[in-house]
């Protein structure tokens, strides 16, 4: 269909011109969208506050059927909502999760025809066993569990027919509707809804080129090659193409329900921890991240390593990269948040593009302290990413904050990750894992950038040692596990850093801070020795070592 427009890129202006010249396509489709969404909105307005569970169940089914009937673009919106228990009623979420991989499949004959057209041979000759029905059907394709001639099981994803045309048509109409209704909505995002749709469209067209997804999967697997906690399926290149992707089969439990995980003797908290730390690694270490971590794309696998569950990632169509500069600035922002250095945090917002370089930061620093400091309070665990984003949306009306478009997918990924975690454990807070993770990385100083950030934290602008900040980092690491045993690797890495070749600049800064102003600063030295003596006393370390070797003996 419309073969001349089957190219795999989204061009907002050219595609809008193309659709406007075809009123026989856009007028009927626009009427269908308006009728479906309008009738759905009317039902939600009139019945959404009902306390009758049967009414709410019918509404949830109505939402599901409406989004499903409108096709891939609208299903993708529903998928995003399905990870947000803080935005959507829990009884509606159960229906919306079906949008992840429980949609009506397209014709099996069509799927076989696409596979043969793409791979040049029928399924019967390429596979030892190919089923008659898919195991899952999602917005852009459906997946079959097939067996190769060598006996290995594989997942074969086949794309839905005519996707480029369908996506292009609906993206143009969605963009037009978004621009029309934007002035009526209480939004102040710093950029228009039209730009959000453009970003969404570009990402969708990357998703439907399975050759790119194969490249993404292999790159992602490389980053986690040494991590037993994260599993990434291997790509079968000889059985993959633009519209067909074959990977090794992952046998696991979808991370959708705490009850389901526990019924398979899997620990939801350990799995959440792995998911969050893997997400932090993607953002702050690798600069390359999975932008669609909804429950249908994450599988819980048996086993634990170092108290962390085993998780399998699938579906690498929606990925994005982060520049080294942004990655380092984000790491610094977390550090400044840990230390409640809101002046430095304001400068981080400037560097990231959330504030204009010419902005006067004087009134913004106390505003940041009110929003972030008030939410954090004395307990890191009180931090909630959704609550913070809500407060920031209020700040945008009073201060010149804007959200750079390049951060749209990052925010989406983080919010989806928190939504998934809260779904499995409503008491979970991402920052409880993020703080210790960043603190450990700083204290290890295993890269030049981390050593630089560490010195930025523990020395002030005059080069004086900030012992209280070092103590804060050590306290965060210890409180994460509740045991001094977690300080053993910190002590090892600290000694290696302090006396190793990479620690020359740290030793120099430390020496200069202790002999500043032509005198020995005994107070700083005494405070440092007292801190190290209390945190790393032989008795504490021995107790920690014992608890690591035998938890029952501690």
Image: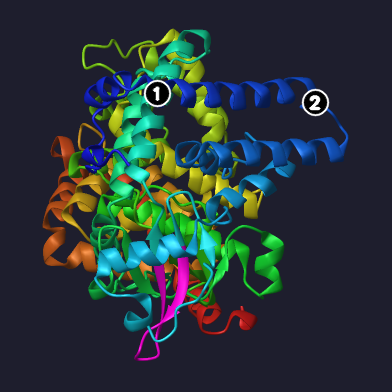
x 52%, y 13%: residue:
185
Q: Secondary structure at mark 2?
A: loop
Is residue 431 visible from the viewing direction of this image?
Answer: no
Find disc 1 in the rendering and name its residue.
24
The magenta segment is 143-156
Q: Which mark is residue 49?
A: 2
The numbered dot on residue 499 is none
Location of residue 408 (image quadrant): top left
- Residue 165: image x %, image y %? 34, 38
**Number of other residues with Cα within 10 Å of mark 1, as a class: few under 14, some 14 to 19, many 20 or more:** few
Dividing the picture into quadrants, the one containing residue 390 is top right
Secondary structure found at label 1: helix
Q: Quadrant of the C terminus?
A: bottom right
Q: Is residue 413 magenta?
A: no
Asked whether residue 148 is drawn in magenta, I would say yes
Q: Kindly give the residue lying farthest to the right in the view shown.
A: 52
């Amino acid at each position: 269909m419309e073969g001349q427009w089957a190219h795999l890129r989204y061009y907002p202006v050219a595609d809008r011109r193309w659709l406007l010249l075809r009123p026989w396509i856009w007028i009927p489709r626009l009427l269908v969208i308006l009728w479906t969404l309008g009738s759905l909105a009317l039902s939600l307005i009139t019945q959404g506050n009902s306390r009758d569970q049967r009414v709410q169940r019918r509404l949830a089914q109505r939402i599901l059927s409406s989004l499903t009937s409108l096709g891939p673009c609208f299903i993708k919106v529903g998928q995003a909502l399905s990870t947000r228990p803080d935005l959507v009623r829990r009884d509606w979420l159960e229906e919306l999760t079906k949008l992840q991989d429980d949609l009506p499949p397209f014709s099996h004959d069509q799927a076989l025809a696409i596979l043969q057209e793409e791979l040049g041979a029928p399924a019967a000759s390429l596979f030892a066993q190919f089923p008659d029905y898919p195991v899952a059907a999602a917005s852009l394709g459906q997946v079959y569990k097939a067996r190769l001639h060598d006996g290995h099981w594989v997942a074969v994803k086949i794309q839905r027919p005519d996707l480029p045309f369908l996506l292009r048509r609906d993206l143009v109409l969605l963009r037009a509707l978004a621009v029309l209704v934007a002035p009526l909505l209480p939004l102040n995002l710093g950029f228009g809804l039209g730009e959000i749709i453009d970003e969404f469209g570009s990402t969708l067209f990357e998703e439907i080129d399975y050759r790119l997804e194969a490249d993404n999967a292999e790159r992602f697997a490389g980053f986690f090659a040494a991590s037993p906690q994260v599993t990434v399926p291997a790509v079968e290149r000889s059985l993959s193409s633009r519209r067909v992707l074959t990977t090794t089969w992952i046998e696991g439990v979808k991370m959708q329900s705490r009850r389901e995980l526990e019924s398979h003797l899997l620990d939801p908290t350990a799995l959440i921890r792995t998911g969050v730390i893997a997400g932090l690694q993607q953002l702050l270490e690798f600069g390359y991240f999975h932008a669609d971590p909804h429950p249908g794309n994450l599988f819980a696998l048996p086993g634990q390593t170092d108290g962390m569950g085993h998780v399998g990632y699938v579906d690498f169509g929606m990925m994005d990269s982060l520049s080294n500069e942004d990655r380092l600035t984000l790491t610094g922002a977390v550090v400044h948040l840990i230390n409640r250095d809101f002046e430095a945090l304001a400068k981080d917002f400037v560097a990231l593009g959330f504030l204009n370089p010419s902005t006067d930061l004087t009134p913004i620093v106390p505003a940041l302290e009110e929003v972030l400091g008030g939410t954090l309070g004395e307990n890191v665990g009180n931090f909630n990413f959704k609550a913070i984003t809500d407060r920031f949306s209020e700040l945008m009306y009073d201060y010149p904050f804007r959200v750079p478009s390049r951060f749209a997918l990052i925010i989406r990924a983080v919010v989806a990750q928190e939504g998934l975690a809260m779904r499995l454990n409503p008491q979970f807070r991402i920052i409880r894992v993020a703080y210790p993770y960043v603190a450990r990385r700083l204290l290890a100083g295993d890269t030049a950038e981390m050593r630089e950030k560490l010195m930025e934290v523990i020395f002030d602008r005059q080069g004086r040692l900030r012992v209280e900040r070092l103590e804060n980092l050590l306290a965060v690491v210890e409180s994460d596990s509740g045991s001094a045993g977690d300080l053993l690797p910190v002590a090892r890495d600290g000694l290696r850093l302090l006396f190793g070749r990479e620690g020359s600049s740290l030793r120099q800064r430390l020496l200069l801070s202790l002999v500043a102003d032509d005198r020995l600063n005994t107070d700083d030295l005494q405070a440092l020795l007292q801190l190290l003596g209390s945190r790393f006393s032989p008795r504490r370390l021995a107790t920690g070592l014992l608890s690591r070797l035998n938890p029952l003996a501690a």
